[in-house]
Amino acid sequence: MTSAEQGPVVAGFDGSAQARRAIGWAAREAMSLGRRLLIVTALPTPVPDLVFTPVSAPVPDVFSEDVVREQAEKELAAVAADCGQRWPDLEVATRLEQGRLAEVVDDGAGLLVVGASGRSALTRALLGSTSADVVHHHERTVVVRGENTAGKVVVGVDGSERGGHAVAFAFDFAARHGRELVAVHAWADLPLDSLSPVRTWDYDWEQLKAGSEAVLEEALAPHRKAHPDVDVRQLVSFDGPAHALIEEAADAALLVLGSHGRGAVRRALLGSVSHAVLYHAHCSVAVIRG
């Protein structure tokens, strides 16, 4: 078992309502996994001269770095105490760091949970980045907590090794929480516009569908065996991956995506499918690292 599989569930906290809801999600997941919860606030370096205060704290609009740190520590202590009251059996720790959240959370973290992108001055000052930035730069699995908390689990399946990690995560989550799992394979690589030199009727759609179903069957088979009680539904879509996943996840609790590695390739992919999903999905979104 890797350190990530044993590590704490980490929640990023910036004082926002979104972050507080994310901490609740992280706490429940930590309880389900039998892990501890670590709540982290990341202060930018250097702390900006002008910082707006948390709505929950009536402190001056402009204050020094020492006051920023003191207020952040108070907020962390308060939210940790709240978690202790709501989940008395959960081990909760806090940490205040300087730097970007994605950089200060070490590789021992099993899971990093953040709230949906906040655009307040506090979010920019304390967290130093939006949830999309964290997803782009953190090297472990990231969950962005969305509005929907009830419903099925949706996972994007592409047949790749990295995509397999997303399938494993989705099955495990669905099994622990008693959720239906919908596995989606979207095919949108065909040139179907009016200027395409290949006519759309030249494609054997039944053959393409059969091939996509085979990809799903192969990707799901070992996980079906490991989690026989999970109710699984397969969906082949000839839509763009982002649109297909967002549509299917409209009534979902969690949408799971695989990461496609580092560098320019990862940035390009996160800039398309994951970027669109993060901004348009109403449910929580998990981006899984291999």
Image (tube, helix red, strand yellow):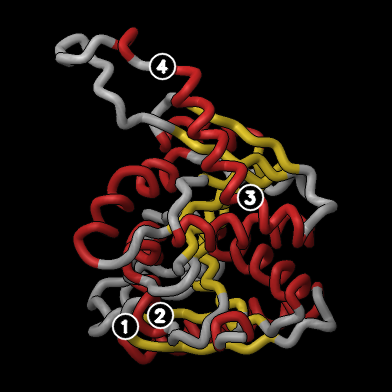
Q: Which residue is mark 3?
A: 220
Q: Is residue 255 above or below residue 73?
A: above
Mark 3 touching mark 4, by CB under 8 A?
no
Q: Amino acid at mark 2?
A: Ala
Q: Amino acid at mark 3?
A: Leu
Q: Amino acid at mark 1?
A: Gly
SS under mark 2:
strand
Say whether disc 2 or disc 3 marks the residue closer to the N-terminus: 2
Query: Left of 84 or right of it: where is 236?
Result: left
Front one among 251 and 117:
251
Quadrant in which the N terminus is drawn = bottom right
How far from the left and from the top, in percent, is residue 236? 54, 30
SS under mark 3:
helix
Q: Which residue is mark 1?
A: 99
Q: CA distance from mark 3 to mark 4?
A: 25 Å
Is residue 16 at least partly visible in the picture? no
Label 2 neighbourhood size at 10 Å, few (<14), some (14-19), many (20+)? Answer: many
Q: Which residue is mark 2?
A: 42
Mark 4 touching mark 1, by CB under 8 A?
no
Say whether disc 1 or disc 2 marks the residue closer to the N-terminus: 2
Query: Left of 185 or right of it: where is 81?
Result: right
Residue located at (61% from left, 80% from top): 5
Query: Left of 56 or right of it: where is 80?
Result: right
Q: CA distance from mark 1 to mark 3?
A: 39 Å
Q: Is residue 78 above or below residue 182?
A: below
